[in-house]
């Protein structure tokens, strides 16, 4: 029992747990309070689910676990053993906070009359939240896993990996979604991708870190 507890602490140290909880809470808030209310569609795995469902009438409930499983399998292969259990925890945490924000009354005004503002504002929540999670090499869904794997294999920035998958799916989605709706989604995925990259790659300046350390020691 003790060894299992120690293994769990090594796998989920406080920093990892806090990142998972904070990241999923922030991103879920934006999804429910903004994107879901304004009906802004997504790129990546979620967009592919909607696309395949439309064209081939495959149930989304079947497509979702299949595409996520493929993405997670690739993540397990290229990102290490700790990736899978941590990402499963993040996925469950995201599901919890999505439900939590659905039950709690809306905390923001309805931006349906201002879709461009909603696209940018929502992207800020999603970008910052997902960035906090990805910063730890963790995924909260198939989109994140796929982007992390592409970034790992090609060496490109995480923002470019997100954009590559999102733009591909959004371009294919033009086959059944009006251009105006795709345009707002394009704004969302662009802003969120840039924020994910900025947050996940942010580092405290060395001098600032040394100064904080001296002040703490003093």
Image (cartoon, helix red, strand yellow):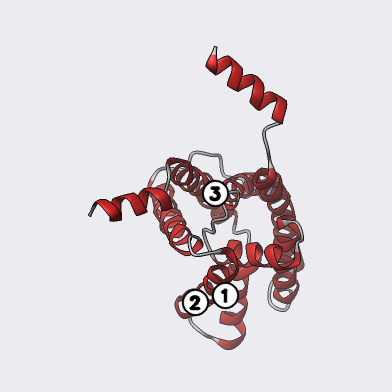
x, y (%) of residue 205? Answer: 71, 31
Label 2 belongs to which residue? Answer: 60
Up/down of 8 relative to 167, above or below? above
- The tag earlier along the polypeptide, 3 or 1, is 3
Q: Secondary structure at mark 3?
A: helix
Q: Secondary structure at mark 2?
A: helix
Q: Tell me whether circle 1 and circle 2 mark residues in contact (CB < 8 Å).
A: yes
Checking the image for residue 27, the label placed there is 3
**Crowd rating for badge 3 (residues with CA inside 10 Å; few <14, some 14–19, many 20+):** many
Residue depth check, mark 2 versus mark 3: number of the one nearer the observer = 3
Quarter of the picture holding the N terminus: bottom left
Residue found at the far top of this picture: 218
Residue 193, quarter of the rendered image: bottom right
Q: Nearer the viewer, residue 71 or 209?
A: 209
Residue occupied by mark 1: 49
Query: Considering the image in quadrants, where does the C terminus appear?
Result: top right
Binning the other alpha carbons within 10 Å of mark 1 as few (below 14), some (14 to 19) or many (20 upward) gives: many
Residue shown at the point (57%, 75%) measured from the top left: 49
- Looking at the image, the residue that sits furthest to the left is 1
Give the Cα separation between the discs numbered 3 and 1. Answer: 20 Å
């Amino acid at each position: 029992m003790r060894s299992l507890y120690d293994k769990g602490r090594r796998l989920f140290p406080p920093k990892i747990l806090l990142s998972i909880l904070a990241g999923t809470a922030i991103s879920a808030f934006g999804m429910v309070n903004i994107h879901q209310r304004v009906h802004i569609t997504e790129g990546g795995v979620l967009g592919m689910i909607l696309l395949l469902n439309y064209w081939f009438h495959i149930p989304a409930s079947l497509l979702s676990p299949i595409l996520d499983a493929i993405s997670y399998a690739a993540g397990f292969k290229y990102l290490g053993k700790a990736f899978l259990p941590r990402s499963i925890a993040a996925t469950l945490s995201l599901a919890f906070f999505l439900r939590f924000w659905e039950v709690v009354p809306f905390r923001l005004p309805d931006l349906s009359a201002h879709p461009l503002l909603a696209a940018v504002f929502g992207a800020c929540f999603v970008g910052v939240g997902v960035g906090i999670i990805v910063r730890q090499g963790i995924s909260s869904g198939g989109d994140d896993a796929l982007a992390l794997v592409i970034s790992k294999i090609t060496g490109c920035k995480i923002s470019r990996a997100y954009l590559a998958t999102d733009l591909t799916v959004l371009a294919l989605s033009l086959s059944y979604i009006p251009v105006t709706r795709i345009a707002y989604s394009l704004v969302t995925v662009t802003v969120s991708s840039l924020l994910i990259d900025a947050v996940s790659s942010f580092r405290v300046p060395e001098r600032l870190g040394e100064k904080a350390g001296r002040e703490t020691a003093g």
